[in-house]
Each structure stands twice: as C-alpha cells, then as structure tokens.
Image (spheres, grey):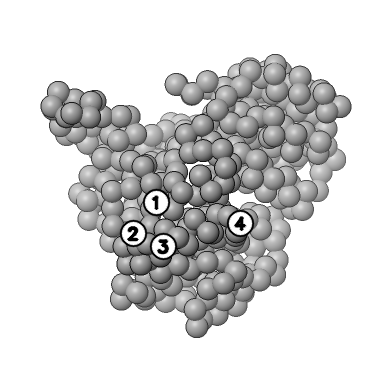
Amino acid sequence: LRAAGYKVGVHTTPYLQTPIEKMEINGDYISPQELVELVGWIKPLAQRADAESPYGPLAYGQLWVALTYAYFARKEVDFAAIEVGMGGRYDFTNVLKPLVAVITNVGYDHTRSLGETLPEIAYHKAGIAKENTPLVTSATQPEVLAVIEAECRQKNARLIRLGKEISYTAKRVDQGGGVFDYMGEGIMYRDLKVSLLGNHQIINATAAVGAIEALKYSGIHIAEEAIRRGLSEARFAGRLEIMQTNPTVVLDGAHNPEKTQKLKEALLKLFTYERLILVLGVLAAKESSQIVDELAPIADLVITTAPDVIGKPATDPEELATRVRALGKEAICEPQGARAIERALSLARPGDLVCATGSLYLVGEVREHWIKQEEVLSAATR
C-alpha cells in the first residue's frame, strides 16, 4: 500500500525497544512529543471512564488501542494495518469494520486464555471476521479451517484460503529472502521477491498479496509494480533479523512451538556455521519445555536467561538450563538478557552462529547491543 502511494498506519504488538514502535505511519514512528500530547489528551477521558463506566477502569491494552486509533485518525491515514494483541474475537483492537481481515497460522499460543485445543483457539481468531467482508487465511489444519469456514458462512464473509483460492510456489529461499510465484483468483504473479527470511515469510507474503487483491471487492486496485516493490522492501525487526556477521547473530521472537519449529527449519536451511549458540529466554506463560525440546538438540551451547518485562514473569532460567542438560546439551545460566548476549558473543568464534530467541521481549532487550533505544527515539524526532 505504501509502495502504491498511500499513507499507511501500522499497529504491531508488542513493541521491541520503545513504545513508539506501536504507532507507525509510512515507516516512521510517532515522535515522543506527539505521544506525550496524545497521552495528555486521553488522560482526562480515561479518568472519566474509570469513574463512570460500569465496566470498571480501562485496561492498559485498551488505552494503547485508543491512542493508536486516535493518532491514525488525526494523521488521516488512507489505510491502517492493525495487528490484534491476543486471539481476535475479544481483543481490544476488534472494534473496526475492516476492508479485509487476515488470519495467518493458528497454533498453540496464549492457551491459558484462548483454550487448549486448536478449534478453541481458532474460535477466537475467527472472531475478526465481519459481515460481507473478505477474510484471508493461511491456516491449513482441517480442524482450524472448519471453525473459520463456519464463522465466514454465518457472516457471509468471502473466505480466501491458502491452497484453494490462493497458492504459492517457492522458487528460492536463502539469506537474501525468498522468491515465489503467487497464484490467486484469476491472476498470477511470477518471481515475487520478499526480503524477510524463511519459507514461512513466503507464506505470510502470499496471504498479504491475497489481502491486497481482496481490496478489489471494495473497488481498490493495487498495481503489480507496487506489490512487487512493497514485498521487496518489507522489513520486520526481531524476525530472523541478522544483526552482524563473523560471528553471525540472528534475533527471532519465536515464542511458541509452531514458531520455534519454523525458526529451527530456517536456522538449518539458511545458515552454515561451525557451532550454534542459543540465547534462550521464555515467559512463564509459554510452553517453555516444548520450545527447549525443539531447539536445544540442534545447538552446541544454550545460554538460558529471562526476559525482563513488567507484569509478565519469566520461566526460571535455571529450569530451562536443567531441561537443556537433560537433553545432553551444554547449558550456561545468565539471568540478565544483556549479559547473556554478551556472554554468547564472548564465547563465539567467527564461524559460529548466535541466535537469541524464545520471546519478543528478550529480542527487544538484546537488540540494544546493536541499536540503542535512544537511536530509535532520535530517529522519530527527525
């Protein structure tokens, strides 16, 4: 959409290093000054709601969504890409009537809140479907699709499914990104290039192109050149992000079994290295045992640590280390994320690969080693 000349707001969650990352327009974050002004504007409204609302005080997440939507409205964006926080049906973001909705993969995440089974989780995801609105999904599990299909039938929402209405053929996947052919409803794009790493990003790109093509049902047509340029220029910090070479350091926020499996596949297929050193930290609410079991076997050394985030306790790094050792792998416990990445770099040789993963919060913390929070903030003021 940006490549087509539109003004596009983007809301992602969580942020990595600074809250201003949650509000982005055409690649630029909201400035700290503008954020302060917005908070000043919403504060009396929030206080009034706290005093008068029968539902009680506004939640932290509700305030963030309100700030984001107000900012995009003030800036008069043409489009806004809104990532939900958790699930979808009851998520704070789900108060809009979108032009198109997108459900990517459905896996075992937030199981304490969304349910222990894929159909239960899919029920929450499918809640973003709206009446007479296209919905694109790259989920392929039959039990998940059954739930999404039922929701779309109920709401008369046009369903666009990966492997049916849209599909792809991967032609190249390496450290430079990926090349693929896209097949859609009456259209085909050959040799699309995506800058993000991993085959799973080709799947995500296929869903994104499907969503762009679905805008035609609202009378909006995006040129092929804009689609090609947008995919090739797309960046997403903290997702198989290469920070340096010799040794190579990769940051990835994989935090559930499905994402961890995709990370494992990417590390094995995209990188050559002498040793793999993992820096691993997982929130207590996540499936830490499954994450360790997936990644530790391919590592030569695992440095366990703890993401530092208010209100979200981490899995004890000693507990992670114990499980790593039970799998026959060497583990070092370093509770502070910043020290953990420094320890990994001090032990790594030029031909090694260092990967920090297990939590987006950990990724944001260790990313400070290369890109300081002050740099992100100062860039937003220019």
| CA distance for labels 2 and 4 | 22 Å
Residue 84 visible from this viewpoint: yes
Label for residue 152? 3
| CA distance for labels 3 and 4 | 16 Å
Under mark 1, the amino acid is Gly
Residue 38, picture quadrant: top left
| CA distance for labels 1 and 3 | 9 Å
In this figure, which residue is indicated by the disc labeled 1? 127
Label for residue 141? 4
Of labels 4 and 1, earlier in sequence is 1
Of labels 3 and 2, earlier in sequence is 2
Q: Crowding at label 3, few (<14), some or many (≥20) Cα neighbours within 10 Å?
A: many
Q: Taking 343 as reference, is 136 above or below it? A: below
The secondary structure type at the circle numbered 3 is: helix
Residue 100 coordinates in the image, percent (x, y) = 37, 63
Residue at image point 76% right, 19% down: 322
